[in-house]
Amino acid sequence: MTVTTTTDLVSYEDALASYDPVMGLEVHVELGTKTKMFCGCSTELGAEPNSQTCPTCLGMPGSLPVMNATGVESAIKIGLALNCEIAEWCRFARKNYFYPDMPKNFQTSQYDEPIAFNGYLDVQLEDGEIFRVEIERAHMEEDTGKSTHVGGATGRIHGASHSLLDYNRAGIPLIEIVTKPIEGAGERAPEVAKAYVAELRELIKALGVSEARMEMGQMRCDVNLSLRPNGTEKFGTRSETKNVNSLRSVERACRYEIQRHAAVLNSGGTIIQETRHFHEDTGSTTSGRVKEEAEDYRYFPEPDLVPVAPTREWVEELRAGLPELPRVRRNRLREEWGISEHDMQSILNAGAVDLIAATIESGADSVSARKWWMGEMARNANESGRPIDELPITPEQVARVTTLVKEGSLNDKLARQVIEGVLAGEGTPDEVVEKRGLKVVSDEGALTAAVEEAIAGNPAIADKIRGGKVAAAGALVGAVMKATRGQADAARVKELILEKLGVEG
Ligand code: ADP
Ligand code: MG
Ligand code: ZN
């Protein structure tokens, strides 16, 4: 067997000319329950290390787990939203392996009896086409603790002098969602992978079961990928790139693995089944460990937990309570707002769909709501490196700004300053208007005085306008705006100038 260790790549186009990619995506979602899956410890982030632990999540002898009902309910909701069948009866299983951040030496998970199975998620690609991704299963499990390796240069265990363990995360409920092999995506495999994870994230958020923030590890994706020669049926050997934690990385990891597999196969090498790590900086993957077979884990049913047997009434109740699916909702909003697929895609990518919808609900018109969120706020989020929905401005406040513009007490330029003030923590829009003294000068007397001054100060331009060159009025409008520190209504200023000079507008 030739184990190829080079990082030679075949160009993406050449790889696709010879091979057909098959993918499998495993997504872990940390649920937003208040307490852990099998004990009452808090799941709140940011606490002192090991302050949110108890004998159960520390795996002390004699401690007993108790199932979190909200965790089960969230799992069923996810299963239903993914068009899955919900098990009438299923159990947890022990997945046995040793890892320092897992004090029980087994992970409580589900094996051959997942709570949800056999579903699908339809995802919309950039060109509007719908691609159906089949779901194998969604099962419940628990998260591990967190290790920090100290003393080395890289933060990895290699070269570290010692390691610290924080068990606050141990036992936080996770749902693992596994797709069936995704075939038929061809050259769009990376796009499909990204669109699937994006849609799944929207769905999870809409269900209200998790905030699904990838950058915080609340949602992470393992990308399985194999190639088979074009026109053949049998799957190739897969690699499994672990814990990919952004949408862009999912796409890049998939693309990279296609190019790497093709290079190995073209040179007569063999792909070994292994886990790999994705590196954001280089966009490449490196070898992890050669993968254990499932039976290495010695799965067996968890004897300390009762089986899960959701009644059909409960399941139907949960089904009836499901929210409108994100893709359906997006299409509805797209029509209501009268925008293109492409514009909606940009709004989705900016994470602004809900914010814009809420701004409109608070009274803004859709054009203004989109303008401010996709302009000022998207730029501010970008520059400050914050998610747009964490900016210190609310949809209600943005709606208030649009009202002030509509009433004529702010123009766009002033509105921008108001938003800037709100984002800088200076208070509500009205408070910023007050403190910064931002108001369109609508007092006709003051405006007329400023207009007369501008005319007197620019006699040559005034003559041109008198002579019929209306376009020259722009320079005078500019002078008035300058004199009023941008606080005049430009349209009204122009009217006044033309009136004074006796010209028809
Ligand atoms: P494991 O726990 O070993 O990763 P799973 O069955 O849970 O195995 O997940 C494997 C994922 O990879 C699934 O999404 C599955 O559909 C997919 N998969 C299985 N075989 C292949 C293959 N040859 N090529 C690509 N994907 C595959
Ligand atoms: Mg796996
Ligand atoms: Zn605990």
Image (spheres, rainbow, N blue to C red):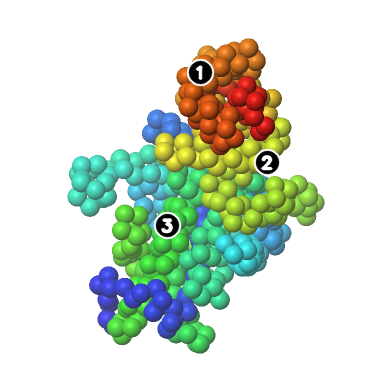
In percent of the image, x 41 and y 52: which residue is there? 105
Q: Position of residue 139 (x, y in %)?
A: 58, 57
Q: Is residue 238 above or below residue 315?
A: below
**Mark 2–mark 1 distance (CA, rounded to whole Å):** 42 Å
Three-letter amino acid code at the position of disc 2: Ser
Q: Secondary structure at mark 1?
A: helix
Q: Quadrant of the C terminus?
A: top right
In percent of the image, x 59 and y 65: which residue is there? 127
Q: Secondary structure at mark 3?
A: helix
In depth, the one of 21 and 86 nearer the eye is 21
Q: Position of residue 397 (x, y in %)?
A: 61, 27
Residue 159 relative to residue 503: left or right: left
Q: Give the residue pinned by disc 1.
A: 456
Three-letter amino acid code at the position of disc 1: Ala
Occupied quadrant, residue 137? bottom right
In depth, the one of 146 and 324 nearer the eye is 324
Badge 2 or badge 1: first in the primary sequence: 2
Mark 1 nearby-residue class (10 Å; few <14, some 14–19, many ≥20): few
**Mark 3–mark 1 distance (CA, rounded to whole Å):** 62 Å
Q: Give the residue pinned by disc 2.
A: 366
Badge 2 or badge 3: first in the primary sequence: 3
Q: Position of residue 400 (x, y in %)?
A: 65, 26
Q: Are marks 3 and 1 in contact (CB under 8 Å)?
A: no
Q: Quadrant of the N terminus?
A: bottom left
In front: label 2 or label 3: 2
Mark 3 nearby-residue class (10 Å; few <14, some 14–19, many ≥20): some
Q: Is residue 99 above or below residue 363?
A: below
Badge number at residue 249: 3
